[in-house]
Image: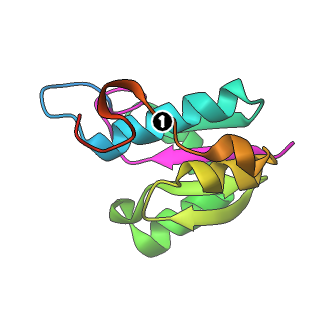
Amino acid sequence: MATIQIFDPALCCSTGVCGVEVDQALVSFAADVDWAKQNGAQVERFNLAQQPLVFAENATVKTFLERSGQEALPLILVDGDVALAGRYPNRTELARWAGIATANATQPQGGCCSGSRCC
């Protein structure tokens, strides 16, 4: 199975899902990462504010930051190769990279919003 590495911009905590004003995209992504891990994916996240040495020690990430700057994060590597930059992947992309059957990659339905984005 592939190893997915997410190099996050400087966030207040390991997932960015903290503080007073939480970015809904980070909430959704954190849920997708949890889902992928529950389905066997190997996912690692690194936060620039908390783990700067990891960024400096990875040649691919270091070169990316030198060329594009911190503003271009997040950077996603799959088995060490750049798969995506500038935005977080969706559940379908995580599933594809991790080799999880796409039938499992659909967003959960039901709950308080019956599948809509109301909550």
Q: Is residue 24 left or right of residue 64?
A: left
Pointer 1 residue: 109
Which is nearer the eye, 89 or 86?
89
Residue that appears at 73% across and 30% down? 39
* 105 is higher (above) or lower (below) than 40: below
The dominant secondary structure in magenta is loop
Task: Write down the region rendered in magenta.
Answer: 1-16
Q: Nearer the viewer, residue 31 or 13?
A: 31
Extreme-right residue of the structure:
1
Where is 54 relative to 75, above or below? Answer: above
Q: Quadrant where the N terminus lies?
A: top right
Q: Does the segment drawn in magenta span residue 69?
A: no
Q: In the image shown, does 64 or 27 lie closer to the viewer?
A: 27
Identify the residue shown where x is 70% and y is 40%. 104
Give the x, y percent position of residue 19: 18, 25
Residue 47 in sight from this viewpoint: no
Farthest-out residue, bottom: 67
Classify 10 Å Cα crowding around label 1: few (below 14), some (14-19), many (20 and above). Answer: few
Quarter that holds the C terminus: top left
Mark 1: which amino acid? Gln
Q: Residue 10: say if magenta.
A: yes
The reply, left or right, for residue 65 in relation to residue 27 is: right
Residue 22 placed where, x, y %?
Answer: 21, 34
Residue 97 visible in image: yes
Residue beneath the point at 57% across and 28% down: 34
Find residue 23 and report its horizontal and vertical position in percent: 25, 41
Give percent across and percent down for residue 38. Answer: 68, 24
Side of 96 relative to 116 (left or right): right
